[in-house]
Image (cartoon, grey):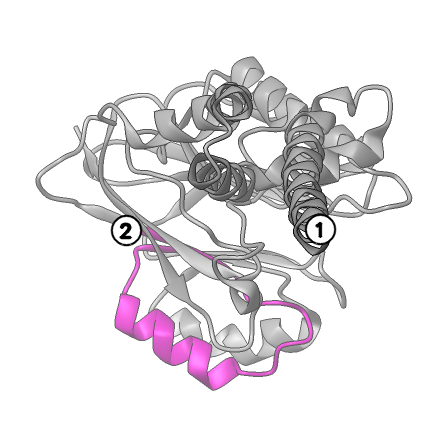
Amino acid sequence: MMNIARRFRLHKSTSTIDATLIVLLLIISVCTNAGYLSGFIPQLDLLIHFQLQYLIALILVATCILIRKKFRLLMLSIILIAIPMSRVVPWYLGSNDTATSSNLKIFSANVKANNYNYHSFIELVNACNPDILIVIEATSIWQIQLKGLIDSFPYLLAHESDGGAGIMLFSKYPMLNKSIHVHSSGMATLTAEISRQQGNFSIAAVHPIRPGIRHGSRLRDKDLLEISKVLSTITGRLIVIGDLNTTMWSKGYTKFVKSNNLLNVSKGNGIILTWGKYLKSLLSIPIDHCFTRGDFSVHSLYAIEISGSNHDGLVFEVHER
């Protein structure tokens, strides 16, 4: 009787483990794909941005299934793994026409509105020494504190705000046709034509409103549409850079890139996690982006830590052909 009871407990424990693994597979897989229904339920967009995390989680569950030698279940897990893998791996493949040297450096930094590490940021800018600097969530206080950068960047375009809508565009080169486009959400896009000996090009510093539980992706995607209208008026070479508040897997992002014929310079350079640095390797996601249109050749793209911010800065080095 004792042997029978022992076998029953062992069988029950085994069944519980297998059931748990199946439930985990289903939950992760639902989260992996639920965001694609954001057209019907905008709040589901919040789930789409963690494809890298879903991939890692599914691989871990599949490893447990393999150890338990549940081969039919393993086949299912492999099929489920293939979905986020098809969304993650292509960003590490191919080439973005990488240049051997650069002649232009752009630094985009979301400093976080309630961050007060002004001097640390100024030191970071001086060390990075970019030709163009974009400062996002630049409150009125930030804008006052950063006025000293005029010595290094004699050309400035800024939209002042006491909240996250503040944004600044600094340049070492003359800026022509400067414009501030305030969207219905209160966020702003800055555009200018940069005048250089290698030839002029346009730049757009962007920061659509962030998604949230109440509106989901609806307001952000509306901002992206308004930004697209601004970009549609720009001809010739163009660089778009900033905090898009979305990853490359959302519907809003896909529509934005296609409608503006943009190339995300992360393609071939890998996924760069820029938001959520206090949760590195857990919930960090790539929501800061740089795009080009025209004959630019990428030298490098990398993240740089900003003291006091929940974002890493994005540094983009390019060679103008």
The percent coordinates of residue 252 (x first, y second) are: 67, 25
Residue at the spot x=82%, y=43% of the render?
185
The residue under label 2 is which amino acid type?
Lys
Residue 42 is situated, as x and y percent measured from the top left of the image, at 83, 30
Residue drawn where x is 66% and y is 22% of the image = 251
Question: Does residue 220 show up?
Answer: yes
Graded by Cα atoms within 10 Å as few (under 14), some (14 to 19) or many (20 or more), the crowding at tag 2 reads some
Q: Farthest residue toward the left?
A: 100
Taking the magenta stretch, the answer to whether it contains residue 258 is no
Work out whether residue 156 can be spotted.
no
Is the Cβ of the residue at disc 2 closer than 8 Å to that at disc 1? no
Q: Position of residue 184 (x, y in %)?
A: 83, 38
The foreground one among 189 and 263 is: 263
Q: Residue 312 at what x, y percent from top left? A: 46, 61
Which residue matches tag 1? 9
Q: Of residues 132 and 42, which is closer to you in this image?
A: 42
Mark in front: 2 vs 1: 1
The picture quadrant where one finds residue 35 is: top right
Callout 1: SS: helix
Residue at the (44%, 27%) spot, across then down: 85
- The boundaries of the magenta stretch are 106-133
Disc with the residue nearer the chain's start (2 vs 1): 1
Q: Classify mark 1: residues with Cα within 10 Å, few (<14), some (14-19) or many (20+).
A: few
Q: Amino acid at mark 1?
A: Arg
Seen in the picture, residue 226 relative to 317 is either above or below; the reply is above
Camera-nearest residue between 298 and 34: 34
Q: In this rendering, is residue 94 above or below 156?
A: above
Query: Residue shown at 79%/33% (left/top)?
Result: 44
